Image (spheres, rainbow, N blue to C red):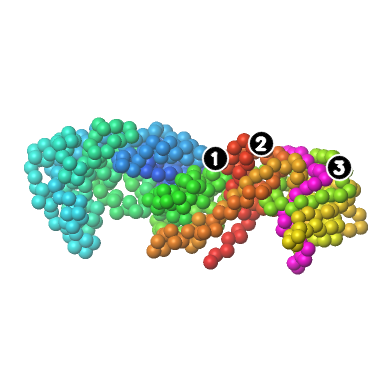
Amino acid sequence: MSTNENQLPSNFIRQIIANDLKNNKNNGKVATRFPPEPNGYLHIGHAKSICLNFGTAIEYNGTCNLRFDDTNPEKESVEYMESIKRDVQWLGFTWHELCHASDYFEQLYSYAVQLIEQGQAYVDSLSSEQIRAYRGTLTEPGKESPDRNRSIAENLDLFKRMRAGEFADGQYVLRAKIDMASPNINMRDPAIYRIRRVHHQRTGNDWCIYPMYDYTHCISDALEGITHSLCTLEFEDHRPLYDWVLDQLQTPCHPQQIEFARLQLEYTIVSKRKLNQLVTEKHVSGWDDPRMPTIAGLRRAGFTPKAIRDFCERIGLTKQNSWIEMGVLEYCIREDLNENALRVMAVLQPLRVVITNYPDGQVEQMEISNHPQRHELGKRQVPFAKVILIEQDDFAEVPPPKYKRLIAGGEVRLRGSYVIRCNEVIKDAGGNITELRCSYDPDTLGKNPEGRKVKGVIHWVSEQQSHPAEVRLYKRLFKVPQPDNEENFLDALNPDSLDVLTDCRVEAGLANADAASRYQFERTGYFCLDAVDSLAGKLVFNRTVTLRDGWVKD
């Protein structure tokens, strides 16, 4: 067990494992697994499971496998597999073994034959609709299929012919023979194999029958020597089937399934089907759209692995589903970026300022700290010249109460530079402000002017030395906290979830911005370079989060 156990908040899973280790269960071994189906990109809910499974293995000096549940090839792809591996590694974890359910297809088939030979499985000719009708309800028992009492020999023959491809898709299924009157519907002779003529991304056309998830998952766990099979709460009713399969087959290892509440984050959806719908219907730009709750989307938005891991630890583990406020995730990323993001200056809606008494052609390098609290991050050189750009809303002809920025006839300090005074406001024929003409006080570099107090500090960039950039201001994709509760979740989409600003200017040093770095645009928010759309000579920055929570609930 690692030495940091006492530093982590306790939860019921840690308590179970600690008790198992105390009793030397599994010979003191802890082995977990993260078993996604590769039918889409991972989302924030998967991040919780990743952190739990890999984190548990690390905490107790155990192992964690990454296993692809690739038993439904119609919806799965290599693209999704690669994205899952990328996401797990990006979050900071390394798997013990990379496994696939398809690695065990031959063994799964042999185990199914064993169940038939034991009289505990049979081949059924009922259609899927008939099987549902025969299954009964929560208050009424099911009824047995006419095929339930086929002979073992006939079942073995039919199952062998199913594998050989003699029957059409859906013509037969293999079902476990358990109890059609069980109060748990999952135990009413569940299907464990179905016929599907679908090309598999790993096994090609070797198989035309594929095992069902509930049958595959427990055996895969056993074959890999998993000790603690951690899964979300919707599988709690499936646990009796998990145990039944392993008990009948008497596998050498019988993992313990433990359920925990899934992550439900406000203003998001985590249904892969609905996320796929958002992508295919082009409500978003792709699986990695920064508004998506996918790990790829969060990464592109500028979230850090540390912030996501911190979030997953903060929300804890329970046995009861509940909604987590989006503000918790945003707090975690703000806390990380406030500590680690480099400070830079960017002007999103530029207003031209000509400093009339500054020498023509002169360029001065202002030395400005990269982080006000972390001096070890050093300083940078920011060019200052006669013409600079400031934010439009950092100037007001008629200032509101307590306004501390630039006004006509007033003074303001430029970040890391001089104090300037606005002497003249230039407007176009329509009355729009196009330019300010100001003067600077050369004696105010690094010190306050004598005899007068300048309250405001604003950011700026040099017009000539700054670089053009597109800045994307992302907001929450949905306008209601629980979009899944809407009659049509698409009706809850936020029509104002993205503002694209195309005339922005950023300080000179950002010409070489690193996609792996995070930046605080001073007084604006936290941003990152968009690694997908930024090209040579075209800078695109995505807003990760505002400096403080400014979300207004409807």
Compared to 548, does 309 lie above or below? above
Q: Which residue is mark 2?
A: 512
Q: Is residue 370 left or right of residue 59?
A: right
Mark 2 touches mark 3? (CB < 8 Å): no
SS type, badge 1: loop
SS type, badge 2: helix
Q: Nearer the viewer, residue 370 or 491?
A: 491
Could you tell me how far apart the alpha carbons at marks 2 and 3 are, in whole angstroms? 28 Å
Q: Nearer the viewer, residue 346 or 245?
A: 346
Q: Is residue 441 left or right of residue 67?
A: right
Total marks shown come to 3
Q: Which residue is mark 1?
A: 532
Is-magenta flag for residue 390? yes
Is-magenta flag for residue 417? no
Compared to 107, does 9 lie above or below? below
State the residue lying farthest toward the right.
451
Compared to 516, does 240 lie above or below? below
* Residue at the image position 58 percent from the left and 61 percent from the top: 551
Q: Residue 154, image x and y in percent?
A: 9, 40
Q: Which residue is mark 3?
A: 360
Say which mark, if any, is on residue 164: none
Q: Nearer the viewer, residue 281 or 27?
A: 281
**Amino acid tagged 1:** Val
* Residue at the image position 64 percent from the left and 54 percent from the top: 547
Q: Which residues are magenta?
A: 375-402
**Amino acid tagged 2:** Asn
- If you read the primary sequence from the N terminus, does the residue marked by circle 1 or circle 2 appear first? 2
* Residue at the image position 69 percent from the left and 46 percent from the top: 505
Mark 1 touches mark 3? (CB < 8 Å): no
